[in-house]
Structure formats: structure tokens, C-alpha cells
Image: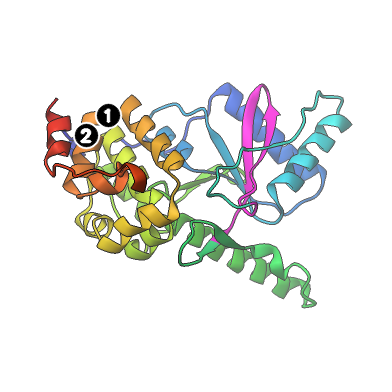
Amino acid sequence: MCITPASIQVKDKIDLTEKEKLIFDCLLQVVQHFNLRTQIRVAGGWVRDKLLGKECHDIDIAVDDMSGVEFCEKVNEYLQSIGKKTHGIGVSPRNPDQSKHLETAVVKLFDVPVDVVNLRSEDYSENSRIPTMKHPNAILHLRIPTEVHAMLLKYVWSQTALDAMMLNDASILFYNINTSSVEDLTGRGIADLKSGKIAPHYHQNRTFLDDPLRVLRAIRFGARFGFVLDEELKVAAANIDVKAAFEVKISRERIGKEINLMICGSPVRAMTHILELQLFWAVFSLPPEMKTPTWEGCGRFLLAS
């Protein structure tokens, strides 16, 4: 049974744990030590979970003017300068359908692995989930007056943040560590949390066609929190082109990981959404050499059992 909107409590501000305070303070000290203009944001589900009063141990950091590796190198350089222990910088494992452009640096702070990426917007080719990145720091080398340069940087970075949020998976909020504030650039993220729905914040057809895995994430989040899937989102997710894109753009391994997370969370709700959107055979399709005549009602039978 879905949670009613009235039962959803959304906090006015994010309360940090002691470990989160240590991590965020360290990141700010890095910025101050090197006199950087870097804006550090927490992205992803951490912001959503904290606003809903749930703890989240996955901290995904987005920086706006350098790569994740470059920022992690500065973190280690700063820690070394104050006599603190440093750890090697790793790169998160690639899935077969991912590109080297999606580089995520991983550094350990206070025994917590922290993922760091460059804040970016994405362009996708027709038959791939692999995006071509558009970096906001492309204007850093323009020869223009300092005051104009600063204004242009602020505008471009805010637009890039908005692009990234619009294309994100139902978690379109940022927590800006520099200002200790939640950023809701669409003006709808917090409202949707309070109303208990997963709603589109961009051209949803394009978003799902760009990366059909976002359909499964929307289903998983909706099932996990008991949120309602917006009607516009449902129409986009059930689109025949989106169903076809599942086979072309996403590896079965990635689909399997999302399904596993659904099963470990709220499997009945998730399966109900999959059936409602008529995505059962797009999600659970067999390899061509193993395909046999199928019974259209087997999804309902699985849910009932």
C-alpha cells in the first residue's frame, strides 16, 4: 500500500552526523588551503534520504571546476601537509556499458569512501548510454575581464548544475557544502518529496531514451519510499521506443543489479510498477538463443506467487 502524501515528513534542513561534519569540514579546508573557487556539492540519494530523516552512507561529491581525480589529489596533498594519513585514489569499477568519461575518483576520509566526480551535463548518442561530457570549466581560459569572467563562471556553473539535476534519477537535489544549504534549482524537488511522488523534471521521453536505466531507478525509488509514479512519467516509461532501448542501450548485468536492489527492498511494489508499465518482457527478456514462446500472464502469476 502506498504512503499517503500527508504521512510524508520532510525536514527543513539537513542534520549532519559527526562523521559527515568531519568529512565536509576537511573538504572545505582543502578549498581554503589551495585558495580554490570550487563549489562542493553532495549529489544523489544522500540529500533525499537525509531530508526524509533516513541515514545514507553513500556520499557522492560533485565538484564544478576540475575532475574528481584532480580534487582527490588535492585532498591527499592537503592531508599530507598537515601530517595526516593519506590513502590511494581509486577509480570506481567500470561496467561494460560505461565510458571512461564517467570517471569517478574514490578517496577515503575518516574511514569512509567518498566518490568525487566533476559536475557535468551530458549528451548521448542514439544507441548508447555512454554520454559525451560537457564541462563548465571550458571557459576558465578565456581572456576576458576578471569581473565578467566571475559572472560568466557563476552562470555557466549554475546552468550545468541545473542540467545535471534535470537529468538525474529522481534525486534532483544538491547539498552545497560551501553554503551548508540544499539546492533545489528546479523548484520542484522538495515539493515532490512532500507530495510523495516521483515526477518528471525534464523532457521525460528524452531522459528515458538517453538512459533507460532511469526507468528502473524511478520504479525502485517509488517502491522503496511508497511514492506514487507521476502519470506523465508512466506514459514516458511505457513508450515503445523506451522499451526497445532497454535491449540496445543497457547491459543485462546493469538491469540485474537494479532488479536485485528492488528485491532487497520492496519487491512486490516494484514488480507491480513493472507490470503496470508493461515493462516485464523488456526487463526480463531472454537472450535470443534461449527465447521460447512466452505466456503473457506469467508476470501476474509471478506477482501472485
Residue type, label 1: Ser
Kindly identify the residue that appears in the image at 27 percent across and 29 percent down.
266
Kindly identify the residue that appears in the image at 43 percent across and 50 percent down.
250
Left/right placement of residue 124 relative to residue 292 reads: right
Report if residue 10 is visible in the image.
Answer: yes
Q: Which residue is mark 1?
A: 266
Report if residue 287 is visible in the image.
Answer: no
* Whether residue 249 is situated above or below residue 226 in the rendered picture: below
Specify the segment rendered in magenta: 100-121
The secondary element bearing badge 2 is classed as helix
Coloring basis for residues: rainbow
Kindly identify the residue that appears in the image at 29 percent across and 53 percent down.
199
Q: Which residue is mark 2?
A: 269
Q: CA distance from mark 1 to mark 2?
A: 6 Å
Viewer-closest of 44 and 39: 44
x and y percent of residue 78 in the render?
82, 36
Q: Quadrant of the C terminus?
A: top left
* Whether residue 205 is situated above or below residue 92 in the rendered picture: below
- Residue contact at pointers 1 and 2, CB within 8 angstroms: yes
Q: Which mark is residue 226?
A: none
